[in-house]
Image (tube, rainbow, N blue to C red):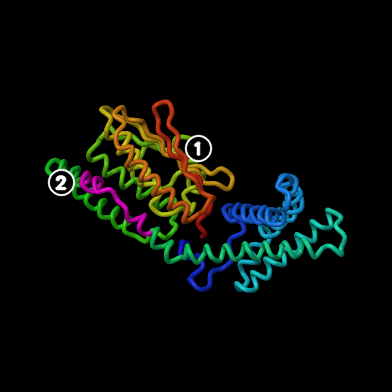
């Protein structure tokens, strides 16, 4: 079954529980509870000179049960996800209460005083659930899907016109190649018009990228060189169609699930900003590897001496960064590095493998 952003809570009126295994959710819980603790101290403080001391005391009371709560919620996330929303919220409150009791035992708090940490934990948990409920309604699936579709639909017109010019350049000398290029262009646009909310296999992304590179070679010829590197296998092959197999390492990587249209825009950037403005040939290197629970995708291209089109490059990368946020929240990130005459874009996202 295809996995998509549409599998978020389905309705505006009935959002589900947050994913307590998501890094963004855990960081927001930490921030919200600590902010609530700081506000609690500020509201009851009558001597401003004791603010730092009171904050330190509150942190000593709050941090241990908070960390225990996060641990229990992380471990219990699959169980909570299988419950109805109301039962799941009760389960979250119960786990937070259990963490408060455990922290009280560790801190040797008398049983008669447990009502304080239990009451505070229940209130903090209720506020966090209310925040995530509000956030889920504000960033509802319908709005997220509309935003994602709009981001995916952005295409640079220059790519379409460049492809047509490339076809016109060979239509007399190589009519068969021109016909094949038009078929590839149609297949590429068909893929670009597909539902951008779906996650696809990395193999599909690589195939789409190969189609794009084949079209760009109509214009750039031998000026465009591309090298693919998969995992620890080192250089795999120079870009070309018909190498869907490969080593076991590469086959495993190609089963990864990624947001659609992730690789092709990065290669388009590399060609448009690194190869096209240059006078001579240039090499684009695509590195794909798995590091633990992360999938790493890196596109490395030369920096053209002319240095043109930086604004367009930034807009395209901002587009990809926002799409990663919609799919993976804070668990995915896009990094940019420029050194030694090379421009590198790295994407790190959670490793999700295609199910068979």
- Residues marked 1 and 2 touching at CB (< 8 Å): no
**Left or right: residue 62 compared with residue 310:** right
Return the residue nearer the eye: 262 or 49.
Answer: 49
Whether residue 247 is visible, yes or no, is no
**Is 228 rendered above or below residue 205?**
above
> CA–CA distance between discs 1 and 2?
38 Å
Q: Secondary structure at mark 1?
A: helix
Q: Is residue 75 magenta?
A: no
Q: Is residue 161 magenta?
A: yes
Residue span colored magenta? 149-163
* Residue 6, horizontal then vertical, whole percent: 46, 65
Residue found at x 37% / y 42%: 314
* Residue 243, horizontal then vertical, whole percent: 38, 45
**Left or right: residue 348 compared with residue 187:** right
Residue found at x 46% / y 51%: 324
Residue found at x 60% / y 72%: 85
Predominant secondary structure, magenta span: helix
**Left or right: residue 10 compared with residue 75:** left
Return the residue nearer the eye: 14 or 205.
Answer: 14
* Residue 170, horizontal then vertical, whole percent: 16, 42
Label 2 sits on residue: 175
- The tag on residue 233 is 1
Callout 1: 10 Å neighbours few (<14), some, many (20+)?
A: few
Whether residue 134 is visible, yes or no, is yes
**Is 90 rendered above or below residue 334?**
below
């Amino acid at each position: 079954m295809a996995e998509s952003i549409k599998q978020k809570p389905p309705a505006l009126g009935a959002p589900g529980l947050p994913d307590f295994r998501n890094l963004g959710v855990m960081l927001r819980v930490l921030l919200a509870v600590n902010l609530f603790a700081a506000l609690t101290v500020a509201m009851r403080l009558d001597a401003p000179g004791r603010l730092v001391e009171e904050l330190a005391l509150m942190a000593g009371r709050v941090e241990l049960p908070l960390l225990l709560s996060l641990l229990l919620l992380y471990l219990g996330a699959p169980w909570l996800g299988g419950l109805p929303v109301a039962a799941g919220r009760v389960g979250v409150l119960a786990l937070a209460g259990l963490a408060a009791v455990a922290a009280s035992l560790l801190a040797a708090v008398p049983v008669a005083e447990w009502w304080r940490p239990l009451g505070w934990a229940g209130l903090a948990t209720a506020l966090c659930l209310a925040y995530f409920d509000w956030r889920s309604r504000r960033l509802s699936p319908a709005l997220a899907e509309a935003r994602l579709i709009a981001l995916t639909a952005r295409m640079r017109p220059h790519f379409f016109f460049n492809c047509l010019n490339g076809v016109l350049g060979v239509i007399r000398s190589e009519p068969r190649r021109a016909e094949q290029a038009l078929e590839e262009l149609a297949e590429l646009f068909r893929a670009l018009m597909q539902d951008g909310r779906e996650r696809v296999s990395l193999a599909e992304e690589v195939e789409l990228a190969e189609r794009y590179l084949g079209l760009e070679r109509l214009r750039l010829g031998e000026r465009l060189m591309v090298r693919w590197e998969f995992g620890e296998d080192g250089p795999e092959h120079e870009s070309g169609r018909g190498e869907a197999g490969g080593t076991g390492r590469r086959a495993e990587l190609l089963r990864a699930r990624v947001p659609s249209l992730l690789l092709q825009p990065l290669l388009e950037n590399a060609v448009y900003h690194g190869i096209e403005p240059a006078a001579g040939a240039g090499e684009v290197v695509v590195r794909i590897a798995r590091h633990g629970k992360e999938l790493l995708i890196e596109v490395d291209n030369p920096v053209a001496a002319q240095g043109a089109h930086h604004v367009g490059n930034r807009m395209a990368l901002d587009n990809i960064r926002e799409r990663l946020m919609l799919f993976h929240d804070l668990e995915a990130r896009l990094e940019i590095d420029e050194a030694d005459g090379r421009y590198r874009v790295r994407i790190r996202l959670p490793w999700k493998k295609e199910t068979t």
